[in-house]
Image (cartoon, rainbow, N blue to C red):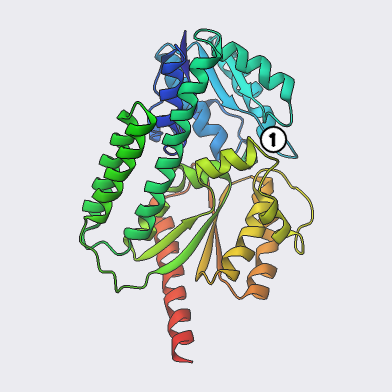
Amino acid sequence: MKISFPYMGTSHIVVSYLFEKLGFEVIYPPTPSKRTLSLGVQYAPEFACLPFKIVLGTYLEVVEKGAEILITSGGCGPCRAGYYGELHKRILHDLGYPVEMIVIEPPLVEPLDFLRKLHKIVKPKGIFNLLHYGRIALEKLKALDVVESTLHELRPLALDKQQINQAYIEGLELIRQADSVKEVIEAKKAALEMLESVPADHTFKPLRIGLIGEIYVVLEPAANHDIERLLGERGAYVHRSIFLANWTRDNVLAHGEKDIRAMAIPYLNQMVGGHGQNSVGEVVRYAEEGFDGVIQLAPFTCIPEIVAKSIMPAVSRDKNIPVMTLFLDEQTGQAGIETRIEAFLDLLWQKRKKQEAS
Ligand code: SF4
């Protein structure tokens, strides 16, 4: 059977590896492009948020290539993400693509549903095959996160930004090719060495910026105009609030990031869906850790992030940390994002200078 899935950050490296080993023919989702978004925009309801449109565009691209099964994650709590699998399926069926949609719900929320769907996915090659390759996939997930966070630390210091960006791409390829836990560990080591070998100015003290918001637009460069690269190339260290391995641990194997939610409670004491409550808690955490500023990424019409944004002025004032919100949709232009980022960085440098002078 031909299977495919949404493209989000570097997760495709792990997901495609796992499904190949489980005995499926994987239709690789392409990196989201202008065509992906325009397909999604064409067939999505107008009110849908940006992740819905990009994922729909991806589905249309992979069904054109013959995908028969689409696998995606579900959602719980007060966010329409929980309906998106069904809505995507209906749109694809109406367009004449009779795909099967498997929506994996969080196992601790819907254990029986999770086991039923797991059985279906695992059936071709058996549970021991899943345990063996699942372990390697998990190691890949962890390796990708370590390499990516090292890139975030070193990019603002690197003398040649193109060189470090290229070293990162080559490092990802090594992790993609690895086929055992030992090979993944070796690939990670080699990828880190490649990043560390790029000449850098280790005396430079970059601005420290926390990146928060809705998971898809935080993790997918095509949705956020490659904001981590834009910031890193302009001398800012980006700490991303969501990494795949941590997210999987906290949301698949547990009931969410309780410590971050606890930090949000003085400002927002209930779940509002998506990452809304986390976004508030993360600003508190970044302020307490001495970060210079926070950027919130919010898909246009995303209610959880709109709720969080309405609370940001109070958190920002109480904790003395600047917060900038970028709303993203298909109308958002690269030049507009770059201008706002540069203005925000100017503000943060001036704030730091004042603090150093006082
Ligand atoms: S969290 Fe926001 S962007 Fe994500 S599915 Fe829900 S409404 Fe859409």
Q: Is residue 104 above or below residue 151?
A: above
- Tell me which residue sits at (38%, 34%) in the image: 33
Q: Label 1 sits on what residue type?
A: Arg
In this picture, residue 233 sits left or right of residue 295: left
Considering every residue shown, the one lying at the far bottom of the view is 358
Considering every residue shown, the one lying at the far right of the view is 269
Front-most of 90 and 43?
A: 90
In this picture, residue 349 sits left or right of residue 116: left
Question: Percent x, y for residue 129?
Answer: 48, 16
Q: Secondary structure at mark 1?
A: loop
In this picture, residue 171 sits left or right of residue 88: left
| Ligand 1, image quadrant it occupies | top right
Q: Is residue 26 above or below residue 178?
A: above
Question: Percent x, y for residue 16?
Answer: 42, 24
Question: Percent x, y for residue 329?
Answer: 52, 44
Query: On the image, numbered disc 1 is attached to which residue?
Result: 80
Question: Percent x, y for residue 38?
Answer: 45, 31
- Tell me which residue sits at (40%, 66%) in the image: 342
The image quarter in which residue 144 lies: top left
Report how many numbered discs are placed on residues in the image. Answer: 1
State yes or no: Cβ of the residue under disc 1 lies below 8 Å from any atom of ligand 1: yes
- Tell me which residue sits at (67%, 22%) in the image: 114
